[in-house]
Image (tube, rainbow, N blue to C red):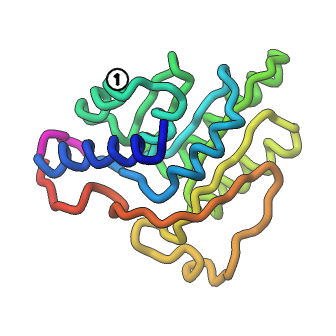
């Protein structure tokens, strides 16, 4: 998919949400289309995609048909997309996807498979204890997992760097980090929606 196609999908979801046709939270993304397309160049056909609650574009790039993904979102599952038939899983809990991704990577290693796990998290999540422990465990056991940190310098509306009193985040093994600025708010699509 092209950056324009990805952006158009999110615009469509925003319109549906703002019209009150989605009766659950949505987390849209934008501004990272080029970075995601680049990341997916190294995702193998049998690799797993593990995401937080912001997963639409990753699912599309993984090969989930837009109509299948939109049906999941319209059914209220935007922030918990789990489509194992496409090897896409997510969790709406902060840090919740990390140990799940770690477990999949451990199972892959034990099976001797060539698959990998590509696991996304936000910059604030990357600084939590659960993230640090999962990343260290994966490094020590040489698990087939790549951690991807989407750094928009925010946790909801709070500046991540100010919270931790840092100017940059620690360098960690097997981690890809990219910065972006989304046009969408943390949740929703700009209008206050009452469910």
Q: Is residue 99 magenta?
A: no
91 horizontally vs 145: left or right = left
Residue 105 position by quadrant: top right
Q: Position of residue 64 (x, y in %)?
A: 45, 25
| Residue at mark 1 | 68
Residue 41 visible? The answer is yes
User: In front: 90, or 94?
Assistant: 90
Residue drawn at point x = 54 percent, y = 44 percent: 96
Residue 90 visible? The answer is no
Residue 128 position (above or below residue 97): below
User: In front: 2, or 136?
Assistant: 2
Q: Position of residue 15 (x, y in %)?
A: 19, 48
| Prevailing SS of the magenta stretch | loop
User: In front: 117, or 34?
Assistant: 34
Residue 66 position by quadrant: top left
82 horizontally vs 165: left or right = left
Give the magenta range.
20-24
Q: Position of residue 133 (x, y in %)?
A: 73, 51
Q: Is residue 21 magenta?
A: yes
Q: Position of residue 176 (x, y in %)?
A: 71, 53
Residue drawn at point x = 80 percent, y = 15 percent: 111
- Name the secondary structure under disc 1: helix
Residue 42 position (above or below residue 8): above
Residue drawn at point x = 52 percent, y = 21 percent: 86
15 horizontally vs 112: left or right = left
Q: How many marks?
A: 1
Residue drawn at point x = 23 percent, y = 33 percent: 74
48 horizontally vs 67: left or right = right
């Amino acid at each position: 998919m092209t950056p324009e196609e990805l952006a158009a999908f999110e615009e469509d979801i925003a319109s549906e949400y703002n019209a009150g046709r989605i009766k659950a939270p949505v987390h849209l993304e934008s501004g990272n289309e080029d970075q995601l397309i680049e990341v997916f160049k190294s995702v193998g056909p049998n690799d797993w995609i593990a995401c937080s609650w912001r997963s639409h574009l990753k699912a599309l790039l993984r090969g989930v048909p837009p109509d299948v993904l939109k049906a999941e979102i319209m059914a209220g599952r935007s922030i918990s997309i789990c489509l194992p038939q496409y090897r896409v899983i997510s969790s709406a809990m902060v840090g919740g996807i990390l140990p799940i991704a770690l477990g999949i990577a451990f199972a892959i290693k034990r099976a001797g498979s060539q698959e990998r796990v590509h696991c996304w998290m936000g910059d604030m999540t990357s600084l939590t204890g659960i993230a640090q422990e999962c990343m260290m465990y994966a490094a020590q056991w040489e698990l087939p997992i790549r951690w991807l940190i989407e750094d928009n310098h925010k946790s909801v509306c709070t500046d991540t760097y100010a919270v931790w009193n840092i100017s940059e985040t620690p360098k960690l093994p097997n981690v890809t980090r990219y910065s972006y600025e989304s046009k969408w708010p943390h949740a929703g699509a700009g209008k206050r929606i009452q469910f």
